[in-house]
Amino acid sequence: MSSAEASLQRVLVSTAALLQGLEAERWTDPDVRVPSLLPGWTRAHVLTHIARNADGMSRALAGALRGEIVARYPHGQQGRNADIEAGATRGSVELVADVRESADRLDRIFTAVADVDGWQRLAGERSAEAHAVARWREVEVHRVDLGGAYAAADWPPEFVAYLLPELADGLGGRAGAGLRIKVTADGSITTDLPGRTWSVGTGDPVDVVGPDWALLAWLAGRPAAAHGVLSNAPDLAAWI
């Protein structure tokens, strides 16, 4: 299986699990008004963001299939933010339907890309394959942000194995002081990461020790999703 085929399979599986999970939650209108794990955003904001992210990727990928460069968000970041704010006022049934329908559209576009082996075509600022990886990340991280039954400890091991080293390797610019990160075997869900360490910054480092999924939650700017199992969780600059 090629890397592109593997990326497609991962995003399809994660998306299907997200949709099944949303149906199982059976959230009411009051339920989607509660705060998410993202400061200032309710569950309704997160659900709207997941849907608009899918539409933005569909727009860019459809353009790539036509040989055109099309922006994911035609009205820029300000328009994107306005769409999320407006969408967050809707009820739970409409929100979940939006996530499902936008995800179905994106799945069809990804399949069309695969049918013509167009994974290396530029779709905006990324290749089509990079969009598949980015969507996988969006689905998994924001599903945890919803604060429902799905938690960071439920992330697929291959997702943690992919993203934790990437964020740890790039931590230098986000840490205000020396840090030493160590993955413990106890509680970890991957097989290769336990025992790995990363050190950044200067001076006496602060040790951040814990299982892989909790370290990833902290590195991704979601310390609350680590559920207090880390030895420390110092503040980091935003992950972009």
Image (spheres, rainbow, N blue to C red):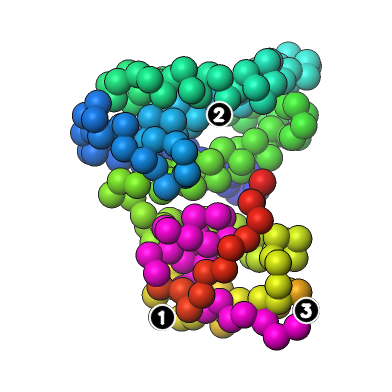
Type of amino acid at the residue the image marks with label 2 = Asn
- Mark-to-mark CA distance, 2 and 1: 35 Å
**Height in image: 50 above or below 235?**
above
User: Dot 2 corresponds to which residue?
Assistant: 53
Is 18 part of what is drawn in magenta? no
Neighbours of disc 3 within 10 Å: few (<14), some (14-19), many (20+): few
Determine crowd level at label 2: few under 14, some 14-19, many 20+ residues with C-alpha closer than 10 A.
Answer: many
Which residue is label 1 attached to? Answer: 186
Looking at the image, which is closer to me, 69 or 43? 43
Q: Residues within 10 Å of mark 1 (few under 14, many from 20)?
A: few
Q: In the rendered structure, which segment of residues is drawn in magenta?
A: 203-228
- The residue singled out by tag 3 in the image is 202
Q: For residue 219: magenta? A: yes
Is 77 placed above or below 235 here?
Answer: above
* Distance from Cα at disc 3 to Cα at disc 2: 38 Å
Q: Residue 69's x, y, as percent?
A: 78, 19
Q: Is residue 22 left or right of residue 175?
A: left
Is residue 132 toward the left or the right of residue 96 in the image?
right
In the rendered image, residue 14, in percent from the top left (x then y), is placed at: 44, 43
Report the residue at 67% width, 82% height from top: 205
Amino acid marked by disc 3: Thr
Between disc 3 and disc 1, the foreground one is: 3
Query: Do we see residue 68 in this rendering?
Result: yes
Q: In the image, residue 161 lies at what x, y percent? A: 56, 63
